[in-house]
Each structure stands twice: as C-alpha cells, then as structure tokens.
Image (cartoon, helix red, strand yellow):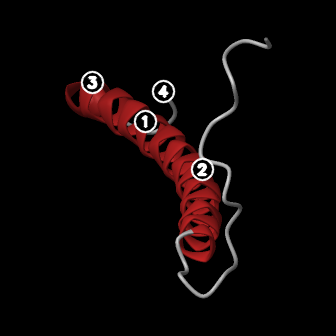
Amino acid sequence: MNGIPPAFQHLHARAVDAEAAARALREDNGRLREHVAVYAQVIHELRTELDRRSDNTIQRSPVRSLPTRIT
C-alpha cells in the first residue's frame, strides 16, 4: 500500500472495510425509510377508510346478511 507503514496496513484495511459497511448501511437505511413512508401512507388510508365506514351519520343498508339458499 502506498505510503502506509506495514504496521498500520491492517488498520487501513479495516478502515476501508468499515467505510464500505457504513455506506451499505446508509443505503439500506434509505430504502427502509422509503418503505416505512409507504407503509405509513397505506395505514393512514386504511384507517381513514375504516373511520369513514364506521361513521354513524352515513346511511347504512338494512341488509345484514345474504340468504344462504333460495327456496
């Protein structure tokens, strides 16, 4: 290695590995943040729809179940 004393070459190699690992972790963190944002939006939309459906001011159908057989 250029200009690195032999006694420190192993430390330099570990530092290079650590930098690569940190870069990969930052990329993973970015992807995870994107996924969390998408999941949060889906949860929000589902919660909003559930709240809308459970709103008592909305007129509901009197049908509670469909017949199981036709006579």
Of mark 1 and mark 2, the one earlier in the sequence is 1
According to the picture, the residue beneath numbered tag 1 turns out to be 21
According to the picture, the residue beneath numbered tag 4 turns out to be 1
Task: Estimate the x, y position of residue 67 in percent, counting from the top left.
Answer: 69, 25
On the picture, is 1 further left or further right than 41? left
Of mark 3 and mark 2, the one earlier in the sequence is 3
Mark 3 and mark 2: Cα distance apart in space: 37 Å
**Which residue corresponds to the image point at 49% horizontal and 51% vertical from the top-left?**
29
Mark 4 and mark 1: Cα distance apart in space: 21 Å
Res 14 seen here: yes
Q: Is residue 61 above or below residue 7?
A: below
Q: Is residue 57 above or below residue 24?
A: below
Query: Which residue is more in the foreground, 33 or 10?
Result: 33
Q: Is residue 6 above or below residue 11?
A: above
Res 5 seen here: no
Q: What residue type is disc 3 on? A: His
According to the picture, the residue beneath numbered tag 3 turns out to be 10
Q: What residue type is disc 1 on? A: Ala
Task: Estimate the x, y position of residue 68 in percent, counting from the top left.
Answer: 66, 16
Circles 3 and 2 in contact, beta carbons < 8 Å: no
Q: What residue type is disc 4 on? A: Met
Mark 1 burial class by Cα count in 10 Å: few <14, some 14-19, many 20+: few
Mark 1 and mark 2: Cα distance apart in space: 21 Å
Mark 4 burial class by Cα count in 10 Å: few <14, some 14-19, many 20+: few
Can you tell which of label 4 and label 1 is closer to the viewer?
A: 1
